[in-house]
Image (cartoon, rainbow, N blue to C red):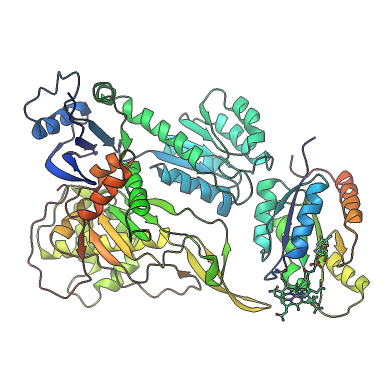
Amino acid sequence: MTPVNIVLGVIGFDCHSVGNKILEAFFTEAGFKVTNLGVMVSQEEFISAAIETDARAILVSSLYGHGEIDCAGLREKCIEKGLEEILLYVGGNLVVGKTAFAEVEEKFLKMGYDRVFGPDCSLEKVVELLNEDLDSRPKGND
Amino acid sequence: MIEEDRKICVDIGSTWTKAAMFNLSHDRFSVETRAVMATTTDHLPEGVYGVLHHLMPGHDWHSLESTPVPVHFASSAKGGLNVAVVGLVPEMTLQIARLAAFSAGARICAAYPYRLTRSCIAAIEQARPDILLLCGGTDGGNERYVTENARAIAGSAFCGTVVYAGNNQAVDHVSDLLSERDLRVTENLMPDFGRLNIEPVRETIRQVFLERIISGKGLDELVRRFKTQPVPTPLAVLNLVEAIGNHVAGWDNFAMIDMGGATTDFYSFCEAYYPDSGTILKGIVEPTLKRTVEGDLGMRVSAASAFETARELLLANLEGSEQSLEIMSAYIDRLAANTSHLPADLAEQQFDQLLASACVYHSLMRHAGTIEEVYTAKGPVWAQSGKDLRRVNRIIGTGGFLAAMGRAGDALEMPVAPAVKSDKIPLLPKDFEYFSDSDYVLPLLGCLAAKYPQQSAATAVSYLTSLHHNEEQVKEFSHREFTHA
Ligand code: B12
């Protein structure tokens, strides 16, 4: 079976790179073909990479507190570029300060992200959910 | 007995066949003799024998079975191969495909991202490119677009060569769809996202280029007789630029402009992006050696299109002079009617210079990347796209017109750019010294660049004339040799 392509990166002008490296290693280990765009990634780059690699999911990180501004509009841009079926996950320290996670989650779900994670999520659990979501979602592109 | 320290180089252009005998002593060549003749278009070897006879009269070149001096030759093959590029994302595979085609010595007549629509196919059928370069998708990535585009090409009337350099997983599908075509499959030009792999495509296009040059017009005769493969002229020049950049001290940040009647070719040799400069990069890191070709910018065949492109720039530069855009427009019409026209008076000479500086300006602007300030949550940040030419500190001018200008002692004039309202700042050379190939030896030396990179590079630099930015001087009108040295 050919591995599922996923795109990974830290959005905006965020340069926290440690978590990004961990995610790359973890998802590669879990059998995905990871295209890691690294830190300071724009929405356009996420989308270009997803198109060229035929990715089925984009995993967005935001650590520095400006996640809300940086992440808004990605779903709409994906739809505009023909990536209607792509899964969007987001995680990290998504907002500044101590906001209840449920509130943060709701905000990002509203923006069109399929799943939202905090900094202390279990990555095994994330992989499990991702596989489930991929199974239940038609392959958009071919 | 072959004399190994002498080399003959012949450049078969669309109008002129030029040749020179070079002598190798120590670390460089020197020009011994030169010759030029009108190209004999229906049987190219005729003109070649003609120039060879000039260089070495003692031999009967028509019947010679082996050559007394090694002969290297380059041919521009009707001004270059036309390539249509079809990629996926514009800033990614499509841009890489452009760079690859240019670096193989080709001209690009059309470029399409994503899906080939019926109107794209119609445009390709009409443009009749020699090659269609099809790519898109990383290896194991997107297959849908390349297969759909292959199907569209299969259903079209386009019958040239298709070079496939896309997703390797789609190769079988694409090959089946294009089984009726002359299809060349090569490695993906972007195997992983953001990673460039230009060399295999470049080599494949070069191969097709050679086949086209050699077939017909009798060049196979020269290949047999001189036991050497021709080099496409633009590739010879590119090889020389690379050799200079790699081998000559102080020449690791330079550019070269080759301006002809039909096109303006721009070459640069410098790092494309400096990560230390506090700037982030959008899109790909462009290659150190880059070539672009502008088919609408030229001094004669393309004078009308260059005039159109440069209208605003010309207007700004004509301000305050007694000439006007209307008078210049009439001159451009005369050029269109007679593409071998030479300037007949001071005014026409001034128009030629203006046109040349406009070609320089626009080809430079298109070759260079840009930088723009983007406002982020963390304050303003610079974002670069394309190639940074700010450190280019030397520019060489070659091609008939710039060589002739060099002989007259004229430096390259950068035109006064009209103020444009744009947030994008072009990454142009800040301060450069201008060198003219006033002896017009670079294309000929280019024939030797692949085999003798060090020596040909040293030679090229030693033949350049350094011209400093103008001190205002009254110029006498001189009737310049325009087309050849
Ligand atoms: C090291 C560090 C830095 C280093 C980064 C060095 C580097 N190259 O990475 C430096 C000093 C440069 C730095 C700078 C800043 N930092 Co800082 N930094 C940290 C620190 C101490 C550790 C980050 C880290 O590496 N964690 C370890 C990794 C493994 O964890 P992680 O990044 O969270 O990633 C994991 C999870 O979040 C999750 N995850 C992440 N993304 C995603 C995505 C998905 C889809 C999923 C499922 C999971 C997931 O999985 C990852 C792996 O386990 C944190 C505090 C902390 N303890 O977290 C602050 C912290 C992130 N920084 C912070 C801030 C404010 C900044 C600055 C803005 C400070 C400033 N005023 O200049 C700048 C921002 C610069 C910029 N443009 O990005 C704040 C963010 C506040 C907020 N979000 O509310 C934090 C939380 C500190 C704090 N408590 O205030 N920082």
**Where does residue B341 sit, x and y in percent of width and height?**
15, 50
User: How many numbered dots are placed on residues in this image?
Assistant: 0
Answer left or right for B102 relative to B350: right
Q: In the picture, residue A91 is in which quadrant?
A: bottom right
Q: Position of residue B380 (x, y in %)?
A: 60, 78
Q: Within the image, what quadrant is residue B215 found in?
A: top left
**Residue B217 appears in the picture as rendered:** no
Q: Residue at x 28, y 40 (%)?
A: B448
Q: Is residue B482 left or right of residue B262?
A: left
Q: Quadrant of the N terminus of chain B?
A: top left
**Image location of residue B19, percent across then percent down:** 17, 38
- Viewer-side residue, B454 vs A119: B454
Nearest the camera: B319 or A21?
Answer: A21
Q: Nearer the viewer, residue A62 or B39?
A: A62
Image quadrant of ligand 1 equals bottom right
User: Can residue B33 be spotted in the picture?
Assistant: yes
On the image, the x and y values in percent for residue B3 come to 17, 30
Q: Residue at x 8, y 57 (%)?
A: B479
Q: Residue furthest front?
A: B26
Q: Residue at x 27, y 21 (%)?
A: B224
Which residue is depicted at the point 16% across and 20% down? B64
Please tell me whether residue B42 is drawn above or below residue B126 in the rendered image: above
> Is B453 drawn above or below residue B386 in the view shown?
above
Question: In which image quadrant can residue A103 be found?
Answer: bottom right
In the drawing, does residue B356 fall left or right of residue B142? left
